């Protein structure tokens, strides 16, 4: 799985220039065999640190969107999904130290930043999120 994620993230970032939130959505949907509507992907266009504002990380935003989609398809209630999102944010923050793009980005932000600086972090976040979703399924 790790090689597949690494290759897919690299392709989405460098060949398609897709942001982190949409990359999370695409990779997670492929891992869990969920079809995404184009409109859903369009909704995530500006979700990379709130459009570059450096606020909540797009890796988190894309994951939260996926959790909503996936668990809705698995007949969870809105309140159950909101609780899962809360739990995910808590666990993500514990593992990575923050939910903010500004704090997660390797080497912070500089004028001459290379594109897709979070490629390695993205792969780790996809694996983390995949394990989180699987663990929630086992709880049922």
Image: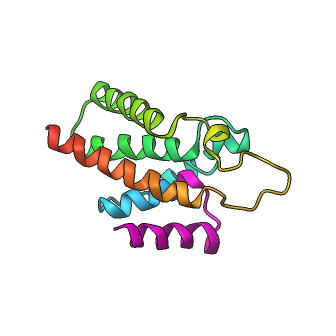
Left or right of 17? Residue 7 is left
> Residue drawn 58% across and 41% down?
57
Towards the viewer: 129 or 82: 129
Dominant SS in magenta:
helix
Magenta span contains residue 74 = no
Task: Say which of 9 and 34 sits in front.
Answer: 9
- Image quadrant of residue 12? bottom right
Specify the segment rendered in magenta: 1-21
Would you say residue 18 sits in the magenta stretch?
Answer: yes
What residue appears at the point 57 percent right and 45 percent down from the top-left corner?
Answer: 58
Percent coordinates x, y for residue 4 in the rendering: 40, 72
Q: Is residue 51 above or below residue 91?
A: below
For this orientation, the residue located farthest to the right is 111
One can see residue 38 in this view: no
In the image: residue 99, left or right of residue 34: right
Residue at 43 percent across and 67 percent down: it is 5
- Compared with 72, 7 (above or below) is below
Give percent across and percent down for residue 98.
55, 34
């Amino acid at each position: 799985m790790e090689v597949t994620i690494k290759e897919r993230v690299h392709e989405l970032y460098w060949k398609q220039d897709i942001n982190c939130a949409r990359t999370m959505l695409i990779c997670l949907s492929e891992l869990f065999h969920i079809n995404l509507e184009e409109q859903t992907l369009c909704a995530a266009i500006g979700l990379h640190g709130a459009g570059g504002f450096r606020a909540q990380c797009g890796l988190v935003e894309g994951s939260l969107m996926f959790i909503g989609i996936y668990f809705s398809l698995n007949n969870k209630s809105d309140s159950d999904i909101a609780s899962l999102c809360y739990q995910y944010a808590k666990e993500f923050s514990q593992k990575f130290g923050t939910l903010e793009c500004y704090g997660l980005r390797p080497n912070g932000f500089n004028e001459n930043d290379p594109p897709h600086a979070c490629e390695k972090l993205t792969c780790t976040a996809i694996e983390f999120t995949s394990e989180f979703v699987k663990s929630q399924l086992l709880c049922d």
